[in-house]
Image (cartoon, grey):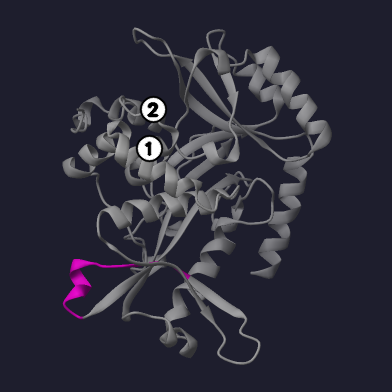
Amino acid sequence: MHTGAAPQAMQPATHQARFHQRWPELCDPHVRALAWLLYAPDLLAADAACWEGRIATLGPVSPAVAGWLHDLQYDPALNAALHAEMARQPSARLGRYAEKLLGFYLRQQDWLVAANLQVRNQGPTRETLGEFDFLVRSPDVEEQGGVVHWEFATKFYLLQARDACQADAFVGPNLADSLGRKMRKIMQQQLMLSAHPAAQAVLPASVIAARALVKGWLFYRHDQALALPAAMGIAPDHCRGFWGDIQFLQERDDAAARYVLLPRLSWLAPARLSLPEGLTLEQLLLRLETLFRADHSPVLVARCHLSETPEPELLETARGFVVPSDWEQRAATTLQHAIVQV
């Protein structure tokens, strides 16, 4: 069983390579996705002044948790329990999928007090005021008889502006969201939920602290290796990808590469696939042209290479959003509107 991380000097350059090296035995898609949630660097820097100490982190994966992930892959009963949990009330929303994975882990570790706990208005309308993603036990607050509120998010943003100086420059692929807007909502609204009088009716214990746990990937135009200002509060080791149009993809093609269109629920962990699932660049371009004729949304693509194993597989080496021709202009317009509103 592989439980130890590679020495610092031997760490591979990309997150994909580090993930494949760290978890070579994991092939179940749910187990790999959960391993990614636990192992991947946080999207936000917990010590950045802009977050005022309100960022949660899971910390490094311990040998005990690494062993548990191995058992989750190979123990039939434990693996069946995971699959049963994921099959219960299935959702096409990636955020909900990630929440269920993390909830399963927290429950198994006996950290979970409550998940998806709704707060409703106590008046006749009973409308929902908000929801606690997770209430967890924590050694630093248990002696105070309280719990910690975690607001959990798994986000994917593309850097639209070349000169990034604010979080609103990172926009979602569908342009309905930005990193700045999401974090303002979390910090100013969602983490304040326990202060609402209606929350007292459902809370099992007092909330001693409220923090955001944020995982995800950030994507840079034409794979530019930009260093972001520390004041933005983004972790320097965050997971990175590229974005560009079809022409950029053609210019960066590698004859040995194979490509995979990643469905939304496969966006978390680096891809590990069988050989027949890979597409040549020519096949990929035909698929993209068909997709863009029907929908003007970016498509997440994984570039893969053959593994050097007795039974070769496709392992993701890079990933990026391929965008339709008008996406960049639409993104620029969205960014301008966001700047005006802030």
Q: Amino acid at mark 1?
A: Val
Give the mark count: 2
Look at mark 1 in the image and give the residue it sits on: 31
The verdict on residue 139 being magenta is: yes
- Is 101 or 81 nearer to us in this picture? 81
Residue at position x 35%, y 31% in the image: 19
Residue 109 location (% of width, % of height)? 25, 54
Which image quadrant is residue 64 in? top left
Residue at position x 47%, y 47% in the image: 86
Q: Few, some or many C-alpha atoms within 10 Å of disc 1 (few <14, some 14-19, many ≥20)?
A: many
In the picture, measured across the screen, residue 30 lies left or right of residue 242, that is left
Residue at position x 50%, y 19% in the image: 304
SS class, disc 2: loop
SS class, disc 1: helix
Kindly indicate whether the residue at mark 2 contacts the one at mark 1 (C-beta within 8 angstroms): yes
Range of the magenta residues?
132-144
Observer able to see residue 166? no
Which image quadrant is residue 8 in? top left
**Distance of mark 1 from mark 2, alpha carbons?**
7 Å
In the picture, measured across the screen, residue 173 lies left or right of residue 40, that is right
Q: Is residue 49 above or below residue 38?
A: below
The verdict on residue 342 being magenta is: no
In the picture, measured across the screen, residue 19 lies left or right of residue 178, that is left
Look at mark 2 in the image and give the residue it sits on: 27
Q: Few, some or many C-alpha atoms within 10 Å of disc 2 (few <14, some 14-19, many ≥20)?
A: some
- Is 242 or 232 nearer to us in this picture? 242
In the picture, measured across the screen, residue 23 lies left or right of residue 170, that is left
Q: Is residue 234 above or below residue 241?
A: below
- Is 120 or 138 nearer to us in this picture? 120
Residue 230 location (% of width, % of height)? 41, 54
Q: Amino acid at mark 2?
A: Cys
- Is 176 or 3 nearer to us in this picture? 3
